[in-house]
Image (cartoon, helix red, strand yellow):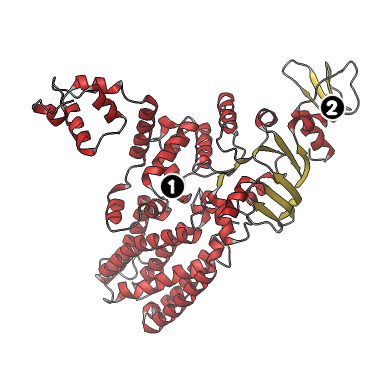
Amino acid sequence: MTNSSPGAAGPVAGADGHPGEDLLASYAAGAIDEVAAWSVEAHLTACGRCRSALSAHVDAERLAHNRSVLLVRAAIGDGGRLRRVLRRGGLPDHVLGLVAATPSLRRSWLLSVMGVLAVVAGEAAAVRYGWITAGSPGRIPGYPGQNLAPFLLVGPLLVLAGVAAAFLPMFDPACRLAAAAPFSGFVLLLARSVSALAAALVPVAAAAFLLPGPGWLPVALMLPSLTLCAFALAAATVLPPRAAAVMAAILWAVPALLLAVDDVPLLIVQRNAQFGCAAVLCACAVVLLARRDRFEWGWIR
Amino acid sequence: MDQMTLNVRTAVVRVDGLSRRYGATRALDQVDLTLERGITGLLGPNGAGKTTLLSILATVSEPDAGRVSAFGLDPRDAAERVEIRRRLGYLPQELGYHRHFTVAAFLDYVAILKEITDRRRRAEEVARVLAAVGLEDRARSRIRALSGGMRQRLGIAQALLGSPDLLILDEPTAGLDPEQRLRFRELLSGLPGDPVTVLSTHQADDIAAICPQVVVLLQGQVHFAGTPSELAATAAGRAWAAGERDDRAHLSWRGGDNRWRHIGDHPPAGAELVSPTVEDGYLMLSHAAGGR
């Protein structure tokens, strides 16, 4: 092997302009330095004869193994644009991989959430701007004068539904594998719940901005939504998970409906209610941390 | 660390006085068991408690009473439970799949659950187990597009991720065709490291073919633990072949040669005594326990 020939062969070319057999063998075995490897590769791209000669030096078993690993990597993919962005943002790839199995992050689920929000927000906007009247068929009976009531009822419940779908065993077909795996069930639960929470809060807050209500409504909805989800998770450490989610939903829906009947649904997102929510949120966080072992053992019993 | 290494080398799984109830139903009743390295077959009819026992061994369920020890580790302790799970491969009886996942993406997901966080290593592990079960050409297929047998093989593949030291397989051959069952037996017999393997099955021929040890579970209790030949021997002198059905037999069925096989204490007229099989021994025990 000499460096005498010019052209595509570059510095690795021999007297005849091609890499020698020894160099090809070393390249195939991965036993040459990086710079020489680049030179060989530059030559190989332009020389069919050397590509053929190289194949004689390749370990067929190793090649088959590499091929199957490459096929697997291609089949796994990189998770799409959002996952790439989050990865660049510093989130560990394996955590993103676990989150990808969260049912409430699927496109169909998110589209359903946006559909429901569009209906309730659209109805509120239509009443507010007089496109439909208070007595028209588009109005939900029982909420006289309060066109925000359906949205206040539904918004936090949608967020809760997304989080519940992220942690209820019934929505995870492979939950028994997760339960038998060494990866922390509690961390898995939190990763899924937080991602589901974020995915659901964004459309709810966006819809709240578009509503003809008070400007603080989107912010005021955040705390009750968070509290509901935290309550459901904390309750799941003492109750069956499904019962915990249903109980949280009832605890929001009943006062929201009662206030709507009395024409004062906004009370539920005003100052005193916010303080109440904050207190419950703190208590739930303490319970969840103290009883997190429940999600490591016996969660799907 | 030295103690841990020692435990792995002398590894056995011990089950002492294990009991578990579901409401009024007693699924396991004072089960005592010792599992050595190698393959142990778990035989029993539906409802005998096999799945409950395996899910407790897999640390998925808790027993009401009794204790389990795997590699000297106690699953009631959080840290030791995680250590057991690091060495575990588990195929549940009804494994659900994220059906929108591709085969490779599903295995990648399970590999993450098994704490294989490096992407390259995960891809190598996924490629290895796919080749082991003959699904390497299906890496890109959506799970919803797989046949039942392929899904079962995918389930076996995920259990093999990470080369587990304790392999728990709940009815792994269900849905496999005869050729796939043969391949599965070959795969299981050739696993490196001689893991502690427990497989439950209804197929007595699977047990006879690959299991040096067999346990018969009936009505939540262990009725037999020994070798397949010892199980077959429990029906010695009580397995008959005859041209006609005999109502006095505990069990009778027509075989492929159009002759009747009888299990019982009384030989039918004109019957000849035949060598008992594992299935004969199992059926004899099952009948004696009133499990059928």
For the residue pair A176 and A223, the one nearer the viewer reads as: A176
User: Measuring 50% from the left and 69% from the top, which residue is drawn there?
Assistant: A288
Quadrant location, the N terminus of chain B = bottom right
Q: Which chain is mark 1 on?
A: B
Q: Amino acid at mark 2?
A: Ala
Between discs 2 and 1, the one toward the N terminus: 1
User: Measuring 17% from the left and 28% from the top, which residue is drawn there?
Assistant: A43
The dot on residue B236 is 2
Q: Count numbered badges in the picture.
A: 2
Where B102 falls versus B239 (above or below)? below
Residue A235: % across, % down? 53, 68
Horizontal side, residue A153 vs residue B13: left or right = left
User: Measuring 56% from the left and 34% from the top, which residue is drawn there?
Assistant: B191
Mark yes or no: residue A164 visible.
no
Q: Amino acid at mark 1?
A: Tyr
For the residue pair A271 and B223, the one nearer the viewer reads as: B223
- Considering every residue shown, the one lying at the far bottom of the view is A272
Residue B112: % across, % down? 44, 49
Where B150 falls versus B162 (above or below)? above
Do marks 2 and 1 both belong to one polypeptide chain? Answer: yes
For the residue pair B219 and B78, the one nearer the viewer reads as: B78
Mark 2: few/some/many CA within 10 Å (<14, 14-19, 20+): some
Residue that numbered label 1 is attached to: B109
Horizontal side, residue B272 vs residue A226: left or right = right
Mark 1: few/some/many CA within 10 Å (<14, 14-19, 20+): many
Q: Indicate the quadrant where residue B208 lies.
A: top right
For the residue pair A3 and B236, the one nearer the viewer reads as: A3
- Considering every residue shown, the one lying at the far left of the view is A6
Q: Indicate the quadrant where residue A89 lies.
A: bottom left
Where A96 falls versus B248 (above or below)? below
